Amino acid sequence: MSTDVMRTLHVEQLKAAAEADAHERTGALPDDQYKHKYLIAIAVTLAAVLELVDTSIVNVAIPHMMGTLGATLDEIAWVSTSYIIANVIVIPMSSWLSAYFGRQRYLTGSIAIFVVASFFCGAATSLWGLVFWRVLQGLGGGALLSTAQTTLFEAFPPQERGIGQAIFGVGVMVGPTLGPTLGGFIVDAYAWPWIFYINVPLGIIAGLMVWAYVKDAAHQVRASSVDVLGIVLLTLAVGSLQWMLERGERFDWFESRFVTMLAIVSVVSAVLLVWRELTIDEPIIDFRVLKSRQLAPGVAFAAFLGVALYGSVFVLPVFLQTLHGYTAQQTGMVILPGAIASAVSMGIMGRAASKIDARPLIVVGALLFLASMYTLSQLTLDAGPDDMFWPLILRGVGLGLLFVPLTGASMAGLPMQKLGQGTGMFNLMRQLGGSLGIAVMATMLSHQTKVHKALLAEHVGSYDPATMERLGGLTRGMVARGFDVATAKQQALMVMDRQMGAQASVMAFSRIYLISGVLLVSALPLLLLWRTGRTVPVKVDAH
């Protein structure tokens, strides 16, 4: 395409952007541009929920996949890892890709890739065939978060943008919760391939709705060149980091040369990526948007939110399934009321977000989350679903108060053509924060369990009367079941060791719940860097 033609297209796009800005200021609605806002919201949120559900739905099907595909636990882990790595690589590029291909084509095409890959994931007959299609599924799914969020910012008029973000937020918060519940039901009722096949009809519906109602953004300018080096550096930086976080705990972190190598590659690639993107005219990722005093603190807070949210989402099912023997479906039913509470509070915030300062709402939300984590830290082995009901309701309400105001205020004042880059950064940091949270929580859980078990063992010995009395009672019980005395004593010692391990696990979970709550509250000082807590309508920058 000639330079003159490109310049003409650029001018026309800037004119369209200026017209959109004028309508933004006056409140006029040209050509009923917002009349399909709820249909657009349903379409893009459905696509985002499908993407998020697929990050966790496979976890409950892993034992069944291992049997069918003849894979080891290490090998089958790639089914989850490959998807997430592909996902986080595409998320920060979504704004550039959307502008390059056109938002309507890019979003519809991404849904099509996701749907086709989902079908072939279900039809896979070998492990590495499944991993290949999971990579393609992740590449298609990466567009369905930040592009969907950007689309919702533009689909609603300025005074109603909180409603659009609330609808999106419900999908973001409820999606990870639905995964294990839905997966457990499908695997029990049908077979593991159906966790992928279910995406096909829902994805087709979302794709058709997106094609019908989502339009290209007038303010986006198509790049005239492709930053291949930037894409390579981004893939190395984000892919290596995600790979390290996914596999680090299994390989004992930096005791492994492989994990150390991944860390070095990630850091070096990230530094080169930032340098590259700041020195070219048409970057894949525009890091300059972080000069915004609204966006930079908001993105940093999103990382803390990801650690706390995904860390707590990871820990609670492990607690219920390992210590209480719950199935994935039972675990989902325990967690579901909190997800509903989150959806309700987000709905309320969506209506009120444009009228209320975001900062006090975020503070209240973070404190409610901390209160929830403190209450969960008091749980014992005797705790049941009733003991977890109100703490999880508190967590849901707290997260609902957080998400919509945080998103709106972070994007406040950001030029319209930079909105996609802003949401891409926001979603990337939340996802990477979530991966970091899961990795750190898993490592801490293992370490803290060992530490607490060692502490408990110091008080359990042959000179402790209570220990000997307990051991004697267990031994007599084993003898009554038909064991000889020597075997009965050995079995009794094994029972005591398991009981100590269970108590040590409870103490470890307690510590991790508290850390999750404290981490989120510790991010609150970032709000002091904001110029405003209002979700000010974004404006088009003509430069």
Image (cartoon, rainbow, N blue to C red):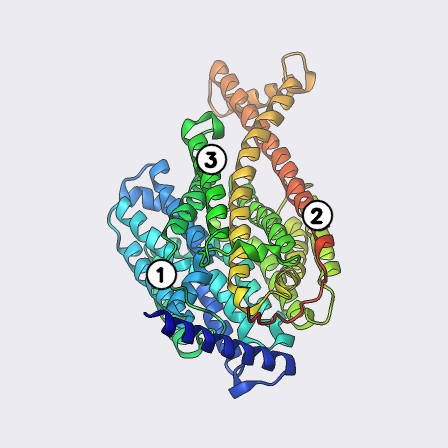
Of the image marks 1 and 2, the number of the one nearer the N terminus: 1
**Label 1, label 3: how many angstroms apart (C-alpha)?**
30 Å
Extreme residue toward the front, this view: 4
Q: Nearer the viewer, mark 1 or mark 3?
A: 3
Looking at the rendered structure, the kind of residue marked 1 is: Phe
Find out whether the residues at labels 1 and 2 contact each other: C-beta distance under 8 Å: no
In-image side of 75 versus 462 (left or right): left
Residue annotated with mark 2: 521
Of the image marks 1 and 3, the number of the one nearer the N terminus: 1
Q: Residue at x 50, y 70 (%)?
A: 151
Looking at the rendered structure, the kind of residue marked 2 is: Val
Residue 263 numbered mark, or none: 3
Expressed as whole percent of the image width and height from the top left, the position of residue 8 reads: 41, 76
Q: Nearer the viewer, mark 3 or mark 2?
A: 3
Q: Nearer the viewer, residue 483 or 186?
A: 186
Extreme residue toward the left, this view: 125
In-image side of 331 versus 184 (left or right): right
- Establish if 491 lies above or below 413: above
Q: Is residue 202 visible?
A: no
Residue annotated with mark 1: 114
Expressed as whole percent of the image width and height from the top left, the position of residue 21 reads: 58, 77
Looking at the rendered structure, the kind of residue marked 3 is: Ala
Quarter occupied by the N terminus: bottom left
Q: Residue at x 67, y 61 (%)?
A: 401
In-image side of 207 versus 454 (left or right): left
Q: Nearer the viewer, residue 493 or 109?
A: 109
**Label 1, label 2: how many angstroms apart (C-alpha)?**
36 Å
Q: Secondary structure at mark 1?
A: helix
Of the image marks 3 and 2, the number of the one nearer the N terminus: 3
Q: Residue at x 73, y 49 (%)?
A: 525
Query: Looking at the rendering, which quadrant does residue 117 occupy?
Result: bottom left
